Image: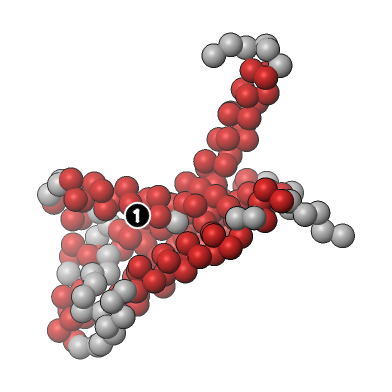
Amino acid sequence: LRTFHHHIDLLRIPVGMYLVYLIYAGLMPFDFRFTLAELKSEMALNNLVPFYAYFKSASLFHIADLVNGLVSFMPVTLYWSARLRARGLNFSDIYPRTVLAGLALGLFIELAQLFSPARVAEITDVLNFALSGGLGTWVLRYYETEVRPQLALYRQGLIRL
């Protein structure tokens, strides 16, 4: 029989809704057209070279966009990593799955944005989704290996903060 994890299973619907929101936000305004002129503008150097626009001019908008991209997929992979850990998988097995899931979602969204004149498809966003996938797993690993043991020692009165 399957063990029911109340603290994890209660998050299934909100995390699923957040994933739907990520896809919706990435595809909005749903104006998909294909012209060679638009495709040529999407294939500009600053869209194909990772982080090119960020090094060309470092503005607060670029930094906020980079941070937003890094943390956007993290809640989904944090939840998914917790589910996989509850099944007994090691972090070495979880990291590739979450990074590849982030890469696949980023590729899907950015390839769809190629056909939207209102959006700009960038390779940086694809890499951000992949890094965000690994970041969610890293946060869970850090909690399990660093924070949880320290909390246990604190609760036992063996250390003071």
Which SS class for mark 1? helix
Quarter where residue 114 is shown:
bottom left
Residue 139 point in image, percent of width and height:
52, 41
- Indicate the amino acid at tag 1: Gly
Query: How far across and down, in percent of the image, does residue 46 sit?
Result: 18, 62
| Residue underneath mark 1 | 69
Whether residue 94 is visible here, answered yes or no, is: no
- Vertical arrangement, residue 64 with respect to residue 118, above or below: above
Count of numbered marks: 1
Check the image and report above or below for 41 versus 1.
below
Q: Quadrant of the N terminus?
A: bottom right
Q: Is residue 20 visible?
A: yes
**Residue in the picture at 35% in, 69% down:** 26
38 horizontally vs 7: left or right:
left
Q: Residue furthest left?
A: 57
Count residues near mark 1 (Cα–Cα under 10 Å), then give few for <14, some for 14-19, many for 20+.
Answer: many
Residue 121 image point, x, y percent = 27, 69
At x 13%, y 51%, the residue is 56
Going by the image, does 88 lie left or right of 99? right
Image coordinates for residue 93, horizontal then vertical, percent: 64, 52
Q: Residue at point 58% right, 52% down?
A: 79
Q: Residue at x 39, y 71 (%)?
A: 24
**Color theme of the render:** secondary structure
Extreme residue toward the right, this view? 1
- In this rendering, is residue 47 above or below 155? below
Q: Quadrant of residue 97?
A: bottom right
Specify whether 4 is left or right of 47.
right
Q: Please name whichever residue, 117 or 128, is drawn nearer the observer in this view of the structure.
A: 117
> For this view, does 33 lie left or right of residue 109?
left
Quadrant containing the C terminus in the rendered view: top right
